[in-house]
Image (cartoon, rainbow, N blue to C red):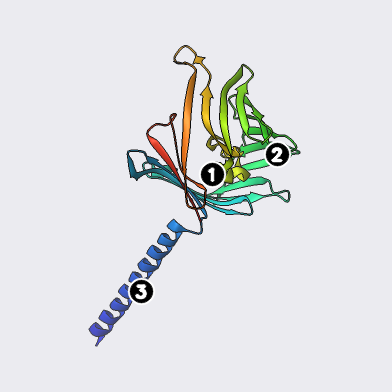
């Protein structure tokens, strides 16, 4: 009788553990698709099934609430971030994997970004239209110029302009602009670009170790059935293609 009771309890335990595994697998699957409504994926152009990294976002009322970053080659960079905003709708905190990762203080139109060690790592200045006009990433200060449509036309340093963005299509929104609410935290991804441009003009560059002539990079894109950009390629990153999903 004791043997049968033990076998019965063991069986119950196995069933319970199996249910826990199923529940966890189900939850993980749901988190993969998640409640995200904008997904940006970079893939190898020659193999569209080979993803390099993926950024999934939950965006509400123009504000990024959640970001899930997945790097398929370097999982140590994977993270889940949430963002907090002040009463003026400006981002003030990034919480990454349940810990404060960056904090932002605002003084009128100037934002200062601090890392988790309270060290200043960036400073951004906006005009009254909240267009980014300059920023310092801890290395150098860059200045941005805009056209009448609010698009970035050139970026320079104290030494002068080093890149121009030409041939804007003002009828097509740049997908990266959906992340504009966290622009001070993701400046390398061009979140402050309103529309898409067809040409990037990179000025000549030369130093002791590296030089580059005047170069023109062409950009192109395809649209989905709703007229939104679903893929982009460019001559600057030749081996990659960017894909966008909207939900």
Which quadrant of the figure contains the N terminus?
A: bottom left
Mark 1 and mark 3 lie on one chain; the one further toward the N terminus is 3
Where is residue 50 drawn, in percent x and y? 34, 44
Mark 1 to mark 2 CA distance (whole Å): 19 Å
Mark 3 to mark 2 CA distance (whole Å): 55 Å
Mark 1 to mark 3 CA distance (whole Å): 45 Å
Q: Quadrant of residue 239?
A: top left
Horizontal side of residue 37 vs 41, given as left or right:
right
Horizontal side of residue 159 vs 222, given as left or right:
right
Q: Which residue is mark 3?
A: 16
Front tag of 1 and 3? 1
Q: Which residue is mark 2?
A: 130
Q: Which residue is mark 1?
A: 175
Q: Residue furthest top?
A: 208
Horizontal side of residue 107 vs 74, given as left or right:
right
Could you classify mark 2 by the number of other residues whose Cα lies within 10 Å: few (under 14), some (14-19), or many (20 or more)?
few
Badge 1 marks a residue whose secondary structure is helix
Where is residue 129 drawn, in percent x and y? 73, 38
Badge 2 marks a residue whose secondary structure is loop
Q: Quadrant of residue 43?
A: top left
Query: Which residue is rendered at x = 47% and y = 29% of the image?
Result: 218
Q: How many badges with numbers are in the image?
A: 3
């Amino acid at each position: 009788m004791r043997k049968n009771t033990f076998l019965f309890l063991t069986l119950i335990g196995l069933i319970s553990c199996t249910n826990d595994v199923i529940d966890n697998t189900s939850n993980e699957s749901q988190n993969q698709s998640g409640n995200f409504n904008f997904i940006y994926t970079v893939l190898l152009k020659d193999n569209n099934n080979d993803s390099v990294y993926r950024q999934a976002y939950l965006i509400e009322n123009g504000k990024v609430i959640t970001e899930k970053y997945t790097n398929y080659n370097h999982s140590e960079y994977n993270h889940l971030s949430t963002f907090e905003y002040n009463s003026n709708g400006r981002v003030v905190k990034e919480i990454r994997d349940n810990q404060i990762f960056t904090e932002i203080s605002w003084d009128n139109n100037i934002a200062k970004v601090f890392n988790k060690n309270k060290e200043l790592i960036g400073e951004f200045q906006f005009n009254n239209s909240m267009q980014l006009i300059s920023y310092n990433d801890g290395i150098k200060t860059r200045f941005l110029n805009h056209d009448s449509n609010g698009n970035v036309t050139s970026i320079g340093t104290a030494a002068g302009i080093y890149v121009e963005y030409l041939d804007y299509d003002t009828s097509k929104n740049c997908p990266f602009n959906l992340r504009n609410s966290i622009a001070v935290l993701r400046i390398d991804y061009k979140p402050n670009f309103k529309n898409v441009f067809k040409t990037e003009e990179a000025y000549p560059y030369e130093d002791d170790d590296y030089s580059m002539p005047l170069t023109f990079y062409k950009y192109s894109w395809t649209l989905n059935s709703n007229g939104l950009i679903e893929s982009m390629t460019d001559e600057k990153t030749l081996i990659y293609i960017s894909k966008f999903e909207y939900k």
